[in-house]
């Protein structure tokens, strides 16, 4: 007799059994049956029960896989999870299985509070924190100390650094030391491998998971979780988990929906393929973009990709949503401070940091980037820049600062902070005003179709009162501090 797979057992789990059987339908009471369309999802969750990639999953009957044996009630904000469940509408769903995925549980080896963004190292892993990092059992970054033991959740960028979504201080009762990562430096003769670039893992005495797995399942690039004890950069493993084998049920099947959150890597062009949190995603000419456009796709940009798995096992994206609304500024750099790492464009101060990509021209003097990664080679009052950025509070944080081949039109793309349909003005950030009252201004909707000025203003919702603000792109000429529009377009 064939045994059902674990995914099949999850799908037939007794969730709301009084209402619906595994075969669907109702019990004759007329009650609405639970959702039936299977979906797999991964990323950083928000509590309530589990909100993952915009879907609110009921986790009350979910089977939770976690080496600390936490129940669904103990799942918390910022934890990175994999989920298998069901959702018919993309808004609500039922979770059948959840796997908790921390990246490290070890002592802090070093802290760099002066870096931008701030960071620490644990288990050889560089952990970056920002305003969105959740802290548990500790007041915040300033309260962390070398030697403290932490459990860290997050998403890795294409350099392998971790952008922490959750940092929790833990004790010896909270599970053994643990590291997760891609195998490197594999030496089967010595029963050793390397994680996070510097940590040597000795697995000679370890058991392998899932049962029946052994050393032959290891290979360079294979994702593993090792549990045991760490001392400095030496890890003695008691258990080695081959993640793709243990988590096969979360991989999804052809024709199933899937959503994945993470940082882009391996990107070269759209349409094409890229990696998101280790998942191969294929974009097509039909892929829709939210909080930005296809032009914003780049390595190290955080996105959520959703779509359907094809027969080749690729996630074919119907939608790519940028996790933080995109900001695009283009215009003359009126001030540059290489020490403070700031550039002023369109009257807005843009902050660069350690992660900012800079593409400038050696010596400055008028466009044509590609030779320098220094802000010192951007000349204030002479060079124009194109800035791709996100906002962190009131700060515009640059992901890329580039000298285009020429100045062209001034341009802003961002969420609207204020709108006045009487004076035909928009406000961006803390004081960049755009005048849209000119007779020749062209207005377009999010599908690039021409619309009237009245229809445009009717569609614009400023940020505030629960609204993130409508993203709008305005192209024109900055005159006396006001962007006088020539073309205006609603963005998704």
Image (spheres, grey):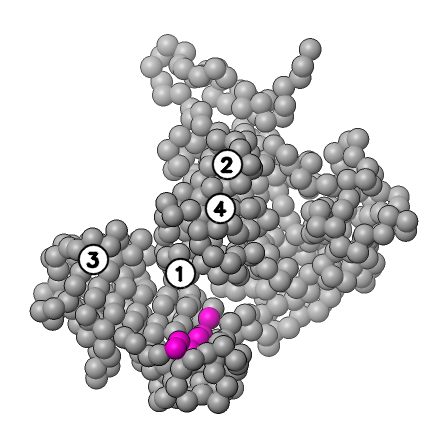
Mark 1, secondary structure of its residue: helix
**Along the polypeptide, which appears first: circle 2 or circle 3?**
2
Residue 97 coordinates in the image, percent (x, y): 57, 32
Q: Is residue 360 visible?
A: yes
At numbered mark 4, what does the secondary structure look like: helix, strand or loop?
A: strand
For the residues labelled 2 and 1, the Cα–Cα distance comes to: 24 Å
How far across and down, in percent of the image, does residue 230 sit? Answer: 80, 56
Around disc 1, counting alpha carbons within 10 Å, would you say few (fewer than 14), some (14 to 19), or many (20 or more)? few
Mark drawn on residue 309 = 2
Residue mark closest to the camera, 4 vs 3: 4
* Gap between marks 4 and 1 measured at Cα: 16 Å
Residue identifier under label 4: 282
Q: Secondary structure at mark 2?
A: strand
Range of residues picked out in magenta? 400-405
Q: Earlier in the sequence, mark 4 or mark 3?
A: 4
Q: Residue at x 77, y 62 (%)?
A: 198
* x and y percentages locating residue 270 in the rendered image: 44, 54
């Amino acid at each position: 007799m064939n045994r059902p797979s674990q995914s099949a057992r999850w799908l037939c789990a007794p969730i709301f059994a009084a209402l619906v059987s595994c075969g669907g339908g109702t019990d004759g009471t007329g009650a609405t049956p639970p959702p039936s369309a299977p979906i797999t999802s991964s990323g950083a969750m928000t509590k309530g029960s589990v909100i993952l990639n915009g879907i609110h999953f009921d986790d009350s009957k979910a089977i939770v896989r976690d080496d600390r044996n936490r129940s669904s009630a103990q799942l918390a904000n910022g934890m990175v999870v994999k989920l298998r469940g069901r959702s018919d509408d993309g808004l609500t769903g039922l979770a059948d299985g959840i796997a908790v995925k921390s990246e490290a549980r070890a002592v802090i080896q070093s802290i760099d509070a002066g870096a931008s963004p701030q960071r620490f190292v644990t288990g050889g892993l560089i952990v970056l924190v920002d305003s969105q990092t959740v802290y548990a059992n500790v007041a915040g970054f300033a309260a962390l100390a070398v030697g403290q033991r932490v459990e860290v959740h997050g998403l890795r960028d294409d350099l392998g650094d971790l952008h922490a979504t959750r940092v929790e201080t833990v004790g010896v009762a909270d599970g053994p030391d643990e590291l997760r990562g891609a195998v490197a430096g594999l030496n089967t003769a010595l029963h050793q491998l390397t994680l996070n670039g510097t940590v040597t893992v000795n697995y000679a005495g370890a058991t392998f998971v899932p049962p029946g797995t052994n050393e032959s399942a290891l290979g360079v690039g294979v994702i593993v979780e090792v549990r045991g004890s760490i001392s400095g950069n030496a890890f003695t493993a008691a258990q080695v988990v081959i993640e793709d084998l243990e988590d096969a049920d979360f991989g999804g099947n052809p024709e199933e929906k899937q959503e994945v959150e993470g940082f882009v890597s391996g990107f070269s062009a759209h349409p094409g393929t890229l990696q998101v949190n280790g998942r191969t995603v294929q974009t097509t000419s039909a892929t829709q973009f939210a909080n930005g456009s296809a032009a914003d796709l780049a390595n190290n940009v955080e996105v959520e990709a959703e779509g359907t798995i094809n027969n080749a096992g690729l996630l074919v994206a119907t939608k790519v949503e940028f996790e933080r609304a995109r900001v695009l500024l283009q215009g003359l750099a009126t001030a540059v401070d290489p020490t403070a790492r700031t550039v002023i464009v369109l009257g807005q101060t843009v902050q660069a940091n350690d992660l900012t990509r800079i593409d400038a021209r050696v010596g400055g003097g008028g466009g044509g980037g590609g030779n320098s990664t220094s802000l010192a080679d951007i000349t204030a009052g002479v060079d124009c820049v194109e800035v791709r950025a996100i906002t962190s509070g009131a700060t515009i944080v640059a992901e890329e600062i580039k000298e285009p081949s020429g100045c062209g039109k001034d341009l802003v793309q961002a969420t609207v902070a204020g709108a006045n349909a009487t004076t035909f003005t928009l406000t961006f950030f803390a004081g960049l005003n755009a005048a849209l009252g000119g007779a020749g201004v062209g207005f377009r909707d999010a599908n690039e179709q021409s619309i009237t000025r009245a229809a445009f203003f009717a569609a614009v919702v400023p940020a505030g009162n629960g609204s993130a603000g409508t993203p709008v792109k305005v192209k024109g000429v900055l005159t006396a501090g006001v962007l006088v529009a020539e073309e205006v377009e609603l963005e998704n």
